[in-house]
Amino acid sequence: MATLYRCKTPTDLLCACGKVARRLRRAGIEYDEVRVPYLKRDRPEVEELTGQRWVPVFVHGEEVISDSKRICEYIDHLQASQSVKPAQETS
């Protein structure tokens, strides 16, 4: 299961966190959502994961990715790798 740490903005249209949430839904990736406080000083769990306090942060297995652009690139990579299937051997 994946986890998205994001801000408390109530809509997915106003911030980078919402951009990532929309991309995850479009890709069909299930994830848990953790809404973090507005004040960066109140985000120790994000700092433990990444060494900084900015969101969004996406945790997928052992991968921890911060920055919305990098997260979207990672999601695109996941989709591409799922759509490539090995060729079946013919006997």
Image: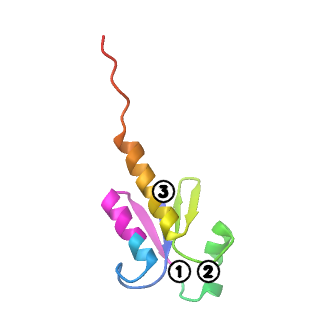
Mark 3 belongs to which amino acid? Tyr
Residue numbers of the magenta segment: 20-36
Q: Please give left or right for residue 85 compared with residue 62 in the image.
A: left
Amino acid type assigned to the residue bearing label 2 in the image: Arg
Which residue is located at x 48 percent, y 81 percent? 7
Question: Which numbered marker is on residue 74?
Answer: 3
Report the number of discs. 3
Task: Return the residue at label 2.
Answer: 43
Residue most toward the top?
91
- Say what amino acid the circle numbered 1 marks: Val
Mark 2: few/some/many CA within 10 Å (<14, 14-19, 20+): some
One can see residue 1 in this view: no
- Disc 3 element: helix
Report the colour scheme: rainbow
Mark 2 vs mark 3: in front: 3
N-terminal-most mark, 3 or 1: 1
Residue 37 seen by the camera: yes
Image marks 2 and 3: residues in contact by CB distance under 8 Å: no
What is the C-alpha distance between the residues marked 3 and 1?
Answer: 22 Å
**What secondary structure is marked by label 1?**
loop
Cβ–Cβ under 8 Å for marks 2 and 1: yes
Q: Which residue is mark 1?
A: 36
Residue 41: quarter of image:
bottom right
N-terminal-most mark, 2 or 1:
1
Q: Quadrant of residue 50?
A: bottom right
